[in-house]
Amino acid sequence: MKTVLIADDALFMRMMLKDLLTMNNLHVVGEAEDGAEAVDKFRKLRPDLVLLDVLMPNMDGLSAAREILDQDPQARIVMLSAMGQSNFLDEARKLGVKNYITKPFSPPRVIKTINDVLSQ
């Protein structure tokens, strides 16, 4: 079973994503409230995929993605962004982020995006 780390400062978003992923045979091995915690948990848990919100306190998603990819250039990261954050997504692609999901999202799109990235 593939493993996922979810990093989002909104508890309801983490819970919603965790439920969705669990129902689709993905194992959520950890959750983080900010980018710094995501980097630390990535280092410890080594998940198959990281879902990173763009805007988080203490360390934003782009900074966290940069640190994770410095540790493991093969890390699979999918960014979570609100509408209108395309400037962040362009930078994320340059860093090596595999894909992104725009909030509000549809569950089928989330699962398709994750499965596409995991199959790369």
Image (cartoon, rainbow, N blue to C red):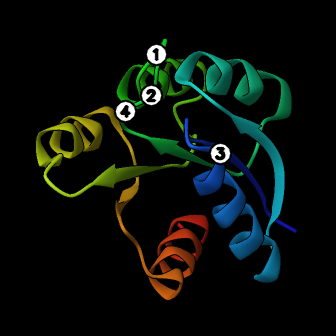
Disc number for residue 59: 1
Disc number for residue 55: 4
Cα separation between marks 2 and 1: 6 Å
Between discs 2 and 3, the one toward the N terminus = 3
Q: In this picture, is 64 found above or below 95?
A: above
Q: Position of residue 67 (x, y in %)?
A: 50, 17
Cα separation between marks 2 and 4: 4 Å
Cα separation between marks 3 and 4: 14 Å
Circle 1 packing at 10 Å, graded few (<14), some (14-19), many (20+), is some
Cα separation between marks 2 and 3: 12 Å
Q: Quadrant of the N terminus?
A: bottom right
Between discs 3 and 4, the one toward the N terminus = 3
Query: Callout 2, which amino acid?
Result: Met
Circle 3 packing at 10 Å, graded few (<14), some (14-19), many (20+), is few
Query: Callout 1, which amino acid?
Result: Met
Disc 1 element: loop
Which residue has dot 3 on it?
11
Which residue has dot 2 on it?
56
Q: Give the residue at the far bottom of this rendering.
A: 108
Q: Position of residue 36 (x, y in %)?
A: 59, 15
Residue in view at x 65 percent, y 45 percent: 11
Query: Callout 4, which amino acid?
Result: Leu
Q: Kindly tell me whether residue 33 is visible in this rendering.
A: yes
Residue in view at x 84 percent, y 24 percent: 44
Q: Position of residue 108 (x, y in %)?
A: 51, 87
**Eye-nearest disc, 2 or 3:** 3
* Residue 61 in the figure: left or right of residue 111: left
Q: In this picture, is 113 found above or below 12?
A: below
